[in-house]
Image (cartoon, helix red, strand yellow):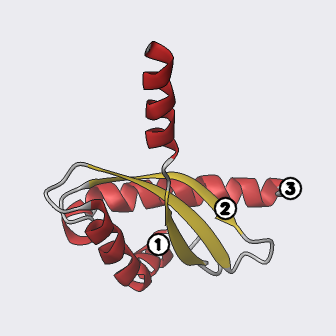
Amino acid sequence: MSTLRQQKINAVLEKELNIVFREESRTFCLGAMVTVTQVNISPDMTYAKVFISIFGGAKPIEEVYKHIKENAGYIRKIMGNRLAKAMRRIPEFDYKIDNSLDYAREIDELLKK
């Protein structure tokens, strides 16, 4: 169970990461649309799991995901600049692909049959 402070930080990180991915989509996302669906920060606030959904783009999802993971340090630096006054330390981000939307789509198709 996460504390109220963790929940607030999760919300701030999710919002700011979405802005970074939207503004820097050509750099980090290879033209694909990347959306942060959920952020879970650790109790000591040093690590955060970031669940992302990747849509469209000319490149395969795996290639976009690999590119995001390779640029994790630079994304963290951008987040540090954006949140310098709000957070003392920016956590390390561990990116995971969120397949829940694909799963929901499959269930919806099964229910329509």
Residue 86 is situated, as x and y percent measured from the top left of the image, at 61, 67
Q: CA distance from mark 3 to mark 2?
A: 11 Å
Residue 108 is situated, as x and y percent measured from the top left of the image, at 47, 24
**Which residue is found at the position 52% from the left and 44% from the top?**
100
Disc 3: which residue: 1
Does dot 2 land on a helix, a strand or a loop? Answer: strand
Label 3 Cα crowd, 10 Å radius (few <14 / some 14-19 / many 20+): few
The part of the image, by quadrant, that contains residue 45 is bottom right
Q: Is 69 in front, or is 75?
A: 69
Label 2 Cα crowd, 10 Å radius (few <14 / some 14-19 / many 20+): many
Q: Residue furthest front?
A: 113
The answer to whether any part of residue 84 appears in the image is: no
The answer to whether any part of residue 105 appears in the image is: yes
Disc 1: which residue: 79
The reply to whether dot 3 and dot 1 touch (C-beta < 8 Å) is no
Mark 3 or 1: in front is 3
The reply to whether dot 2 and dot 1 touch (C-beta < 8 Å) is no
Q: Is 109 in front, or is 29?
A: 109
Q: Is 75 in front, or is 94?
A: 94
Q: Residue furthest top?
A: 112
Residue 63 is situated, as x and y percent measured from the top left of the image, at 27, 70
* Disc nearer the start of the sequence (2/1): 2
**Which residue is found at the position 86% from the left and 55% from the top?**
1
User: Which mark, by number, is residue 40?
Assistant: 2
Q: CA distance from mark 3 to mark 1?
A: 25 Å
Does dot 3 land on a helix, a strand or a loop? Answer: loop
Mark 2 or 1: in front is 2
User: Does residue 98 lie above or below 44 as drawn?
Assistant: above
Residue 58 is situated, as x and y percent measured from the top left of the image, at 13, 57
